[in-house]
Image (cartoon, rainbow, N blue to C red):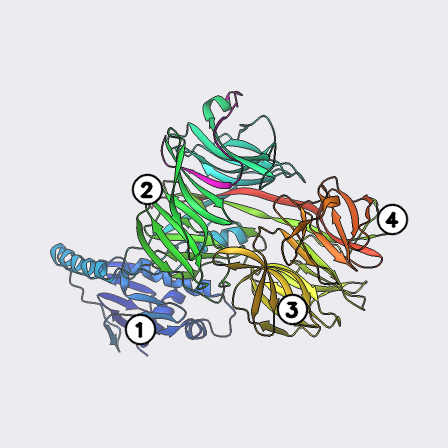
Amino acid sequence: MSVQYWVGDFFIDLSRNQVTYDHQTQTVPPKALAVLTCLAKNVNQVVSQDELLTAVWPDTIVTPNTLQRSIAQLRKVLSANLESKAYIKTHAKQGYSLECEVRWQANITTPKLTKRSKQSANETHALAGGKERQKGNRSWRHIFAGFMLTLLFGVGIGLNSMGYFNGSKPFEFEVKELRSLTATDNKEYGGVYSADGQYVIFQRYPEKLCRSSIWAKHLETGRETPLMDKLGTYGEHSLSDDGKQLIYIEANDCTTPVTQKQCYTLQRLDVAKAFEGHNQPTQIMECKNTKIIKPTWLNDDQVLLMQLTDKRWKLILYSVSGNESQTIYDVLDGRFIDYDYSGKDNLIALIVLRNDHQRYLDIVRPSGELVSSQPVENIPEISPYRRISPNFTPDDEQLIFSTGRQLFGLTFDGQVSNISIPLDTSISTPTFHLNGQRALVVKGFYDSDIAMMALSNVHAENYVTLDRSTQFEHAAQFQPGGDLIAFQSNRSGEAQIWLYDGKGSQKLSNFPKDSYFNGIHWAQDGQSVLVNVNSELFRVLLDGSQKRIPMNDPIRELFQWNSKDDSALGLVNIDGQPMLVALNLRNSAYTIVSEKSVKWAQKSEDGRVIYTDLLDRFWITGSVEDTLIPPLMSQGSDKRFVITHNVIYGVNEASQLWSYDLNSTEFQVLGAVPKTIDYLTDVNHTNVLFSNHVASKKSLAELVLAAN
């Protein structure tokens, strides 16, 4: 085999591990050159990742990221020639190809290199640029490998990391530092940079409390300053361009609830005065019958907001001086998921799940003008119904999002690429500073256990933890006629279904990475469980085999399952709105049970459907109209409820376990339960199961990039 060859105007000398162009010679790692040689031997043909890994790393176990680093190294070397930056092309889900002339030499010689004139090179580059502008499509190659490796190994690694549009200049960065910004026993969320980049503003939740405070941290001195003098229920926040004003959402119990328990106010805070201790915010607007979240400051008078009206999210533009809002984006054929705003480009990126069950990326201007709308590519690593929330990156027309332990790139034309390395903890989507050299992430864990308490002795201290772990566990269910307990756990590093037999636990299911669960229920014979995973239904047998139950719509929540007649009770999105439905699993059909906003629902043994609304009131569905259950008017909470033998069991906001007999209408408080209960999950004749919050740790981290 020849040890010398030409790739375009680049002379490759494998005997010296060198690449020469324009009288300039670079030493290149042997493995990277081996990758180039393999591509050169298959010039103008797609070579799969597996073929490259086998050829270059035989009998060695390496990750695809190793290959991607070699590709990045080669692209950096070949970028010495403006024409050659598109020599190595990525073919999504297929592999790579070398698209240029290759000339082989049998004998070792000294290359005869001719220096091209600047005029010739510039003309060629202009022609190539014109062709690429006509193409208009850009595709991701690789983002954030250095970031993920830094998280894994604690070292900074320089990488070519942002996506490559066909022939366009890649966004390259080098990881300079990854540092933790907070290190307390509290939970931190929602970090945003100040405009000058000197500090970050974030929310801090004291351990085991659901209320937070807003803090600022100076990045150079490390000094932390509380901007609020009280704990509250605060949502996401946004800074004005000059960093002087902060807007945020605060939720409080409504004085006289009408349609919802909490009212939402948009508040404005003078940051400079707050640093001095004068932290009195100004209320800008209040919503008593709708919900508002995610404010984004556009200018001194305009704020972007998501508003929930009639069970439908809309994007509104609120005028502070005029105290009025206008809807700039509404989805009539689906539902609006999330958005991000780019101040640099004055563009809004919106994620929509339309009624065809396809995700779309819509690019909109603040005026409401639609710039583009593209379906988001479906890839095997992401469930088609998964909620994604991309953020803009510093590079043009590119976004990034996280599904937990994976990162993905998303281009304006809807192309998606997996760009992550698995982590042992979840991270949030990176939020970049305007200069593009830094990004904030939230990382951490949530620890909850499965706990059991005897119905005969209900007391806050009288419970046992079943097979303690340090991971998130919930949705425990007693096996009918058996001794097993099925539950969801992350103890293996992935969310899966587990079985507890009184002595220990073993994993039952094998669902993909970053899966999410919304319902687990046993069959009446105790030989299988029905699971709502990634908004799809699967029946999992005790031998671990899994069978998908096809449905026509995504299942937001699985409340109950009757295996005898293959029916289920669930929450399904219909025309973009969640509705309580009765599912027929045999023919994938459904019947609407209620069009009201339902938080939780169960079906009694005699066929009555009970549900709670947004005010945590209990309703019984009827043929003519639904009716309230008066004795339970003040007993609802976010802890859910269970119906067993026509008896409702629930936990009220005073952390008391109670029961209500649907036949005798007898109401009884059974005793106090731990205030750390997340959800009540199941009840049998003698015991009650619940998920119990143990600890949670969320902290801010900053990714610092080297200047290009």
Q: Is residue 286 magenta?
A: yes
Q: Separation of disc 3 and disc 1 at Cα?
A: 58 Å
Given contact means CB atoms under 8 Å apart, are the residues at marks 2 and 4 in contact?
no
680 lies left or right of 346: right
Q: Secondary structure at mark 1?
A: helix
What residue would you read off at disc 2? Answer: 344
- The magenta segment: 276-300
- Whole-percent x, y for residue 316 in the image: 41, 42
Given contact means CB atoms under 8 Å apart, are the residues at marks 3 and 1 in contact?
no
- Whole-percent x, y for residue 331 in the image: 41, 53
Residue 207: mark in rendering:
none
Crowding at dot 4, Cα within 10 Å, few <14 / some 14-19 / many 20+, comes out as some
- For marks 3 and 1, give the one nearer the viewer: 3
Q: Secondary structure at mark 3?
A: strand
Q: Separation of disc 2 and disc 3 at Cα?
A: 51 Å
Q: Is residue 239 visible?
A: yes
Q: Is residue 2 magenta?
A: no
What residue would you read off at disc 1? Answer: 40
Badge 3 or badge 1: first in the primary sequence: 1
259 lies left or right of 10: right
The image shows residue 371, relative to residue 269, as above or below, that is below
Residue type of the residue flagged with mark 4: Asn
Q: Separation of disc 4 and disc 1 at Cα?
A: 75 Å
Crowding at dot 2, Cα within 10 Å, few <14 / some 14-19 / many 20+, comes out as few
260 lies left or right of 682: left
What residue would you read off at disc 4? Answer: 457
What residue would you read off at disc 3? Answer: 567
Tell me the residue at 62%/48% (across/down). Answer: 613
Badge 2 or badge 4: first in the primary sequence: 2
Q: Secondary structure at mark 2?
A: loop
Residue type of the residue flagged with mark 1: Ala
- For marks 4 and 1, give the one nearer the viewer: 4
